[in-house]
């Protein structure tokens, strides 16, 4: 599944050349995940709507992570199986890891951090009842639909 997903990511992200741009996407998407969790705890979402929102946001973060791994020439074959961890532990881990990615000085540090980010995303997907295959399939559908409608660029969750 990861190879099929990578091909989809490369089609929809083919014009992105800058690793800094991709890192900014990783920062933004992980922040959106934290924001949705915060708003759920505040009572803004019902459980099922929240889970679907999380599926989309985890998919967006996954898209950037896979694109980053490819563009930075990291050979990451797949997402590791999820561990039984708490949602908040994964949110905090995402925040720490994204800071590590930005601060990474060596390719090895970037690789280890990217691999850890991908593992944390797998854990987070599991927290919401999804496999990474579920996440990748849903994200492929969304990005391919946006590509067909020429809506890859722009703002908003529901383009």
Image (cartoon, grey):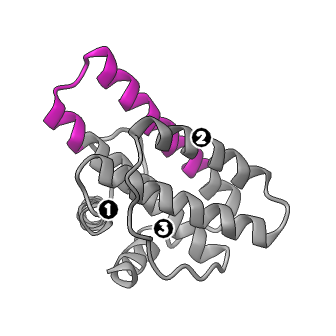
Prevailing secondary structure class for the magenta stretch in the rendered image: helix
Q: Residue at x 36, y 56 (%)?
A: 59
Q: Which mark is residue 46?
A: none
**100 up-or-down from 156: above or below:** below
Above or below, 154 against 74 in this view is: above
Residue 87: in magenta span: no
| Residue depicted at 32% across the width and 59% down the height | 150
Q: Secondary structure at mark 1?
A: helix
Q: Is residue 139 above or below residue 159?
A: below
Q: Residue 152, can we see it?
A: no
Q: Quadrant of the N terminus?
A: bottom left
Q: Residue at x 66, y 61 (%)?
A: 113
Task: Specify the segment rendered in magenta.
Answer: 24-52
Label 3 crowd (10 A; few <14 / some 14-19 / many >=20): some
Q: Secondary structure at mark 3?
A: loop
Task: Tell us which disc is closer to us: 1 or 2.
Answer: 2
In the rendering, which numbered label is found on residue 95? 2
The C terminus lies in quadrant: top left
- Between disc 1 and disc 2, whose residue precedes? 2
Sequence order check, earlier mark of 1 and 3: 3
| Label 1 CA crowd tier, 10 Å (few <14, some 14–19, many 20+) | many
Q: CA distance from mark 2 to mark 3?
A: 24 Å
Please name the residue shown 83% across and 67% down the image. 106
Mark 2, other Cα within 10 Å: few <14 / some 14–19 / many ≥20: some
Mark 1 touches mark 2? (CB < 8 Å):
no
Q: Is 51 on the left-hand or right-hand side of 29?
A: left
Coordinates of residue 77 in the picture (x, y in percent): 49, 82
Residue on which the image places disc 1: 143
Locate residue 95, reporting x and y percent.
Answer: 59, 40
The residue beneath circle 3 is: 13
């Amino acid at each position: 599944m990861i190879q099929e997903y990578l091909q989809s990511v490369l089609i929809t992200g083919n014009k992105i050349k800058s690793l800094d741009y991709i890192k900014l996407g990783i920062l933004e998407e992980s922040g959106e995940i934290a924001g949705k969790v915060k708003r759920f705890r505040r009572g803004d979402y019902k459980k099922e709507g929240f889970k679907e929102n999380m599926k989309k946001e985890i998919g967006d973060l996954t898209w950037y992570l896979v694109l980053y791994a490819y563009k930075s020439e990291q050979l990451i074959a797949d997402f590791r199986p999820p561990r039984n961890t708490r949602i908040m532990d994964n949110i905090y881990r995402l925040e720490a890891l994204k800071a590590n990615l930005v601060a990474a000085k060596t390719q090895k540090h970037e690789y280890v951090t990217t691999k850890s980010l991908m593992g944390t995303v797998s854990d987070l997907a599991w927290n919401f009842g999804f496999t990474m295959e579920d996440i990748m399939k849903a994200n492929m559908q969304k990005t391919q639909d946006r590509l067909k409608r020429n809506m890859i660029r722009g703002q908003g969750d529901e383009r």
